[in-house]
Amino acid sequence: MSKIETIGIVGAGQMGGGIAHVSALAGYKVLIYDVGAERIETGIATISGNMARQVASGKLEEQVRKDAMARISAAPDMAGLAGADLVIEAATEDEAVKRKIFAQLCPLLNPEAILATNTSSISITRLASTTDRPERFIGIHFMNPVPVMKLVELVRGIATDDRTFEASKGYVAQLDKTATVSEDFPAFIVNRILLPMINEAIYTLYEGVGSVEAIDTAMKLGANHPMGPLQLADFIGLDTCLSIMQVLHDGLSDSKYRPCPLLVKYVEAGWLGRKAGRGFYDYRGEHPVPTR
Ligand SMILES: NC(=O)c1ccc[n+]([C@@H]2O[C@H](COP(=O)([O-])OP(=O)(O)OC[C@H]3O[C@@H](n4cnc5c(N)ncnc54)[C@H](O)[C@@H]3O)[C@@H](O)[C@H]2O)c1
């Protein structure tokens, strides 16, 4: 397998942007694709803004930022990802969406290219089986926000070969991140533990045990969490939280993973958290205000 030099990214949202950010800083060429030119532009502008903040806080030199930004380019269509050695899919957490992307993407890629997914929960083996390259398919699960979080979960599907696993491990090391290996079970390790806690916090709100502020303060000061579970849910995106709970519920057939009806309601309202301007907090003013 040839050396990984160019990373293709599908999805210029929070995660795709973050993966592009750290890959470009680590010296990789990055091609980034999303459903519309405007989304790609917004994604690249967000990366630029985030790197500028790193410069302002003294974590990055201006020249390093400039060089990294010069390594990132927009792929106006999926064919623009054809030259990538590793493509990471970071589109919406919806299996049908991801399958459709792989069906369109695979015929365009070099047969040797590795295809990875950043899915938070969906079976790697099942996703791999819909592609032309289950041996070269793997889960590379970054944490949010990518530039800050040290961990990456590597998840092999049943067919993932050793070369793909080793090349993915090398890529994660080049990013100066730590890889843990998770077996291919619904939501892997981090989200198998984290999301039921967040879902329980939403039940706690739903049942009136406490307000948004009380629940978040309780977990910050009482359990020493750096941020409350409802704030964290907003940060992850409530649509993503709901999808992960649904994957856990369906995949493990255990009622303890039932998504809280209040989470469903917020998602149905389009109150998806920070990225939508409103979730358990309203972010449209100067300071976040609890919505309940
Ligand atoms: N948010 C988190 O904390 C987090 C953490 C780890 C992994 N993930 C996973 O990363 C993935 C992306 O999550 P996100 O938080 O960045 O979501 P997001 O909503 O910020 O971004 C998703 C992007 O995918 C794009 N997209 C949708 N359909 C597409 C298609 N057919 N082709 C190209 N792009 C398409 C959307 O336009 C959007 O820009 C999901 O699988 C999610 O589970 C999320």
Image (cartoon, rainbow, N blue to C red):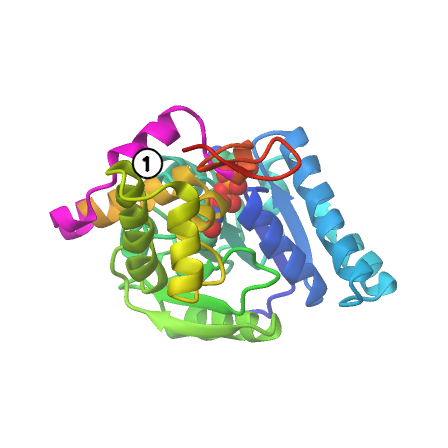
Residue 206 vs 62, above or below: the answer is above
Q: Point out the residue furthest to the left here.
A: 254
Looking at the picture, tell me which residue is in the foreground, 242 or 227: 227
Residues in magenta?
250-273
Left or right of residue 126: residue 45: right
- What secondary structure is found at the residue carrying circle 1? helix
Left or right of residue 113: residue 137: left
Q: Position of residue 46 (x, y in %)?
A: 69, 44
Q: Position of residue 228 (x, y in %)?
A: 44, 53
Q: Quadrant of the C terminus?
A: top left
Give residue 263's quadrant in the image.
top left
Does 269 appear in magenta? yes
User: Which residue lies under the disc numbered 1?
Assistant: 263
Three-letter code for the amino acid on which mark 1 is drawn? Leu
On the question of residue 123 being in view, the answer is: no
- Crowding at mark 1 (Cα within 10 Å: few <14, some 14-19, many 20+): many
Residue located at (27% from left, 45% from top): 204
Residue 132 vs 149, above or below: the answer is above
Q: Position of residue 42 (x, y in %)?
A: 68, 36
Residue 39 vs 253, above or below: the answer is above
Q: Is mark 1 within 8 Å of ligand 1?
A: no
Residue located at (39% from left, 58% from top): 219
Does 278 appear in magenta? no
On the question of residue 202 being in view, the answer is: yes
Residue located at (40% from left, 37% from top): 239
